[in-house]
Image (cartoon, grey):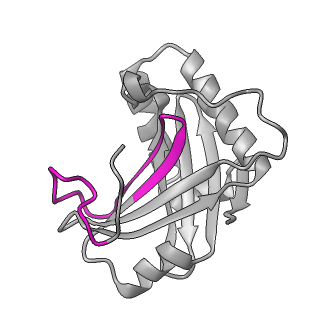
Amino acid sequence: MPTLSVGQLYNPVRTQWPDGVSQYNYRSGAHELVLFLGEPTEREIKAARKGKAEFALFVRQPAIILAYKFGDGIPWSDAVFSIHLVPESERDLPSADLESEVRANLQVLLVDAHTGILRALRLVSFSPAFTRALHSAIREQAQAPWDQALYDSIAAGLYALYPSSNDFVRVAQARCTGGI
């Protein structure tokens, strides 16, 4: 994976992304959350870099929803995930043999959706309990047969049932404040 630097392109061959979209991935053994905001404000950039990081996990297989909030600048938002959508060459499952106090790290990136420039880069950690819950959900998801239509239907149904990120937070199976 290429080295990322604030002020440089997030992806050297792409300069525009859908505004307001986020992507959570677990690939090559690492957690990553990319926020795409068109012309992010200084408040949003500061929140992504240093704001209190909060996370909520909602699982209804085959969908995993990661909700997140950064300080006062980035309100509760969410990203839906499936390990089956990760390219096979990058698909790596979290170990079930982790010590009970292990904290997974999450790389957080804020990208200007209009230019593709990386505006903030940060590393935070999940609590041990949140790490266990998320890793368990990913392993469970990987064991199930993949059905794109079922995934799309479940995800659409969840967003109809819980139309705002705050709704996912309210019914989350796990929550934590990020560390590091």
In this view, the residue in front, 105 or 161, is 105
Q: Where is residue 81 in the image (x, y as percent from the top left)?
A: 47, 39
Segment colored magenta? 7-34
Query: Farthest top residue?
Result: 145
Q: Does the magenta stretch include residue 16?
A: yes
**Residue 101 position in % (x across, y down):** 83, 46
Identify the residue at horizontal 59%, vertical 16% (top origin).
143
Q: 90 or 169: nearer the eye?
A: 90
Asked if residue 170 is positioned above or below residue 64 in the image, the reply reads below
Is residue 164 something one can see in this rendering?
A: no
Q: Where is residue 87, by image quadrant?
A: top left
Residue 149, how many percent across, how many down?
Answer: 36, 23
**Can residue 150 be seen in this snapshot?**
yes
Residue 107 placement, left or right of 57: left
**The C terminus lies in which quarter of the figure?**
bottom right
- Residue 111 vertical position relative to residue 42 in the rendered view, above or below: above
User: 62 or 139, which is in the foreground?
Assistant: 139
**43 lies above or below 93:** below
In the image, taking residue 176 as reference, residue 150 lies left or right, namely left
Residue at the outermost right position: 100
Q: How many labels does the image show?
A: 0
Judged from this view, the residue extending furthest toward the bottom is 42
Tell me residue 35's x, y (percent). 39, 61
Vertical position of residue 151 compared to residue 107: above or below = above
Q: Nearer the viewer, residue 94 or 161?
A: 94
